[in-house]
Amino acid sequence: DSGVTQTPKHLITATGQRVTLRCSPRSGDLSVYWYQQSLDQGLQFLIQYYNGEERAKGNILERFSAQQFPDLHSELNLSSLELGDSALYFCASSVGSGADTEAFFGQGTRLTVV
Amino acid sequence: SQQGEEDPQALSIQEGENATMNCSYKTSINNLQWYRQNSGRGLVHLILIRSNEREKHSGRLRVTLDTSKKSSSLLITASRAADTASYFCATDGGSYIPTFGRGTSLIVHP
């Protein structure tokens, strides 16, 4: 158990809908990263938050947004869902955001868009 | 886009044999990490090696880093069926964001 909790584990929704994925980082970790894993694209970095502030952005679509709350949990919002958004979404957390930072991953949320 | 690329894409060995996976990357890094992922599950952190380190050990794992060649290798010695998983390297490209390759799928036959 990595200490990172993601909910829900599975999500099935229709095209055009909006969903929210939730992540609770390990106790004491200030950084939260979001990744999308699909068969054709591999593991893609979406966005990072550090202590409530957006720190880095990757291949995140404009239809997607995220935030980190004062208690450090994070939510990833996916809207106007398309079939191609079906993927595993992972959250990872780390203590800091520097070079010695190990990232610990949650078990992921499997999103299926039908 | 992937920063690190693992090689081979797939590896099939017998229990007791050693497994070697390689990772090549393109830009300078601060650190490189190796992760394991069992099918459909989360990634498990295995080892982190800093850019100023050349070799690191953890149990049956040995990681080497050659920054001049922009490559790293992960050696699993005396493999077990339970080592069957996908293995990923993650480099930070100087930005401290772990960026993953597509992974090596390892199958260890009992």
Image: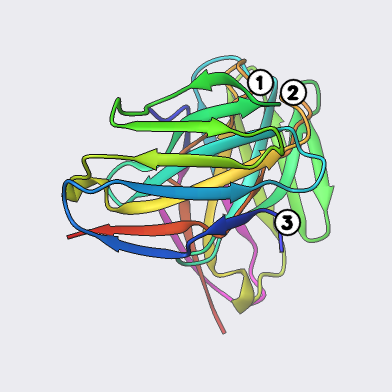
Label 2 vs 3, first from the N-terminus: 3
Query: What chain is tagged by disc 2?
Result: A
Label 2 sits on what residue type?
Ala
Q: Residues within 10 Å of mark 1 (few under 14, many from 20)?
A: some
Residues indicated by labels 2 and 1 sit on the same polypeptide chain = no
Location of mark 3 (residue): A3
Q: CA distance from mark 1 to mark 3?
A: 32 Å
Query: What chain is tagged by disc 1?
Result: B
Looking at the image, which residue is at 42% across and 47% down? A20
- Under tag 2, what secondary structure? loop
Residue B108 versus residue A114 in the image, above or below: below
Location of mark 1 (residue): B67
Instruction: State the quadrant of the C terminus of chain A.
Output: bottom left
Looking at the image, which residue is at 43% across and 24% down? A58
- Under tag 3, what secondary structure? loop
Q: Main secondary structure of the magenta part?
A: strand
Residue A88 can be seen in this image: yes
Label 1 sits on what residue type?
Thr
Q: Residues within 10 Å of mark 3 (few under 14, many from 20)?
A: some
- Residue B30 in the image: state x and y as whole percent: 70, 20
Circle nearer the viewer, 2 or 1? 2
Magenta highlight range:
B6-21
Circle nearer the viewer, 2 or 3? 3
